[in-house]
Amino acid sequence: MNAYSSALERSYNLGKKGGMAKGIGMGCTYGVLFGAWALLLWYASTLVIHKVTNGGQAFTTILNVIISGM
């Protein structure tokens, strides 16, 4: 029973470390993704405000960038 318990303890500790690494990796990935989307939306709104483009063209460009990124 002690051997089984110690084997489970090692597996548990490795699982915690693996879960933390995966969580940090996914968190950084989603953070960069949402940051890029926010920058894209901000820049498109700036172009619309300064009358460089209209909202329809900006929206279409945003969709194209997001879909091509997938």
Image: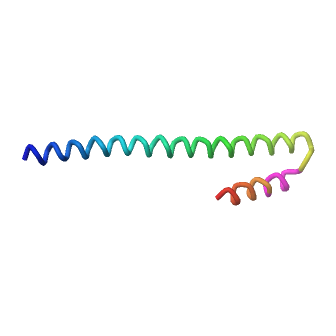
Q: Residue at x 74, y 57 (%)?
A: 63
Please identify the residue farthest to the left as the structure is shown: 1
Judge whether 25 appears above or below 59 on screen: above
Image coordinates of residue 38 in percent, x first then y, are: 69, 42
27 or 41: nearer the viewer? 27
Q: Position of residue 47 (x, y in %)?
A: 86, 43
- Taking the magenta stretch, the answer to whether it contains residue 67 is no
Q: Nearer the viewer, residue 17 or 70?
A: 17
**Horizontal relation, residue 70 to residue 45: left or right:** left
Q: Position of residue 21 (x, y in %)?
A: 43, 42
User: Which quadrant does the C terminus fall into?
Assistant: bottom right
Q: Is residue 68 above or below residue 25?
A: below
Is 36 on the left or on the right of 6, as rendered?
Answer: right
Q: Residue at x 72, y 41 (%)?
A: 39
Q: Residue at x 85, y 55 (%)?
A: 57
- Identify the residue shown where x is 54% and y is 41%: 28
Magenta residues, as a range?
Answer: 54-60
Residue 25 relative to residue 40: left or right: left
Magenta span dominant secondary structure? helix
Residue positioned most to the right: 51
User: Is residue 57 within the magenta segment?
Assistant: yes
x and y percentages locating residue 23 in the rendered image = 45, 43
